[in-house]
Amino acid sequence: MGVHGTWADIKGFALQVLTGRWLMLFASFLMMASAGASYMFGLYSNDIKSVLGYNQSTLNMISFFKDLGANVGIFSGLINEVTPPWVVLSIGAAFNFFGYFMIWLAVTEKIAKPQVWHMCLYITMGANSHTFINTGAFVTCVKNFPRSRGLLIGLLNGYIGLSAAVIAQLYHAFYGDDTKSFTLFVAWLPSAVSLIFLRTIRIMKVIPQKRYYKVLSKFLYISLGLAGTWRTKQSLSTANIEIPSPDSTHVDQNKLSSWKHVFSPPEIGEDHSILQAVFSIEMLTLFLTTLCGLGGMLTMMDNLGQIGTALGYSLESISTFVSLASIWIYLGEVMVGLLSEIFITKYKCPRPLMFTFSLFLSCIGYLLIAFNVPNGLYVASIITGFCFGGVWPLLFSIISEIFGLKHISTLNNVGAMACPLGSYLLNVKVTGYLYDREAEKQLRALGLERKPGEELNCSGGQCFKLPFIIITAATLLGVLVSLVLVFRTRKFYNSDIYKKFKDETRAAESETVVAKNPNVGLPKLEAKIDLKS
């Protein structure tokens, strides 16, 4: 009897672990930690440029389509509205493998030289896979831990930033110094992780627990230790579970808002429909702020390799910049997510104000590059990485707080759509064009002429001076626009923004008490019956 009881306990415990929310959270961390290849474009962009003979404008065009794929997750959001998470994750795994595998075939010359639009398509699909993986895991976690969203969003996005360092170390262990094999590695690794944990990621019934925040804080300390380990290697050598029914994941068609209610949104903090949120002043200001602010950060991150080459840094130093940026992206995401939660709960500081500060701080990094300060690229990669990491948990938290959690998977991707647009304007139309103009000017000064199919390189501080002055000005414009959002949401953040979830928790606790003690309240009823008799 004792042996049977022990085995039953072990089976019960194992089942609880396998179906529990903590394994789901762990699986989400692993997915995020393997889905950051879009942050590492600087490591393999030189191979694309040299093997395929592109100039900087063409390379930046490919980079733009990478950003487009990485940030336009509206399709993954809409699919996630009407299907369970495993469908979204499966699509992401397929997109990831196809996109990066085709890029690997191109840079290793195993297929005929592809057209530019082919490369744009491949990198768009590869990068867009991350929106499917992130939506499937990210939105599920936020819905399973609604009262700890600030810290949780910071952790999840932090692992994406940290993934650049994790992938770089694993790639070096598997492939050594063969940089052309990097795209093969990022083709199979994230896809394999997603498929392994496909059925683990799912929506669960929210169980009232006051210790969730403390447990998530432990994850933060563990991840900080992991980040510290990689930071010392700065350079590369190169409970009851309720499974929702299928109907619970579908949109209730009867509740979709009609057009007449689009311009009459509910109060800030209440659940908005998709159209109410999209056409609101808050979303417009957030979109413009993101366009101006994150467009410059993406330009900086995507051009790290070319900036380092132009300013005379060694290949080892360029690898260090990429590693530094990825580590500080992680630190920015987890630290800003944690600090913003503290400032809101203790000091009622509006979260959009911290978004404003992050954009303003990034201008320092841009100016260090623009004026070619000695060793300034080291500091610039740290500042930009920290700010770039910090704005993501702020952006997603602001959207979920202002517009509610009902359509968070779609609205998060609507807000993120500003990033590729900003990248196109500042990276392709400004930075790429001005870089190529300066490179052609240097060729003419040497009496040379670029032959078709040859890469076009620029050398010296003038290559990126004017582009980053323009990027600084655009970011400052984003700072001014963000102050409008701060002003419009100040009353909301001065109140208890988690009141609704606290009320729901109390109601759930009351239901639990009644369920466990069905006779509560019966003595009074019996007394009344006796009086009547």
Image (cartoon, helix red, strand yellow):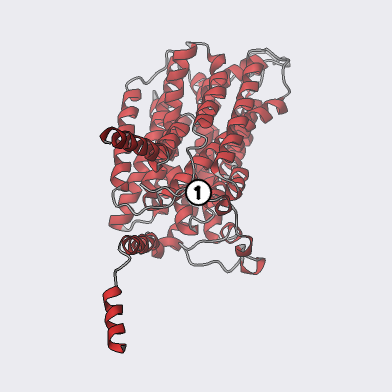
Residue name at image x 52 percent, y 31 percent:
194
In the foreground, 19 or 289: 19
x, y percent for residue 138: 48, 42
Give the side of residue 387 with respect to residue 446, left or right.
Answer: left
Residue name at image x 59 percent, y 53 percent:
250
Q: Quadrant of residue 420?
A: top right
- In the rendered view of the protein, which quadrant contains the N terminus? top left
Residue name at image x 29 percent, y 69 percent:
520
Give the structural element (helix, strand or loop) at label 1: helix
Question: From the viewer's perspective, is residue 66 above or below residue 179?
Answer: below
x, y percent for residue 13: 34, 38
Q: Is residue 460 visible?
A: no
Q: Quadrant of residue 365?
A: top left
Q: Residue furthest front?
A: 1
In the foreground, 167 or 179: 167
Q: Residue furthest bottom?
A: 532
- In the rendered view of the protein, which quadrant contains the C terminus? bottom left
Residue name at image x 30 percent, y 63 percent:
517
Residue bearing the label numbered 1: 478
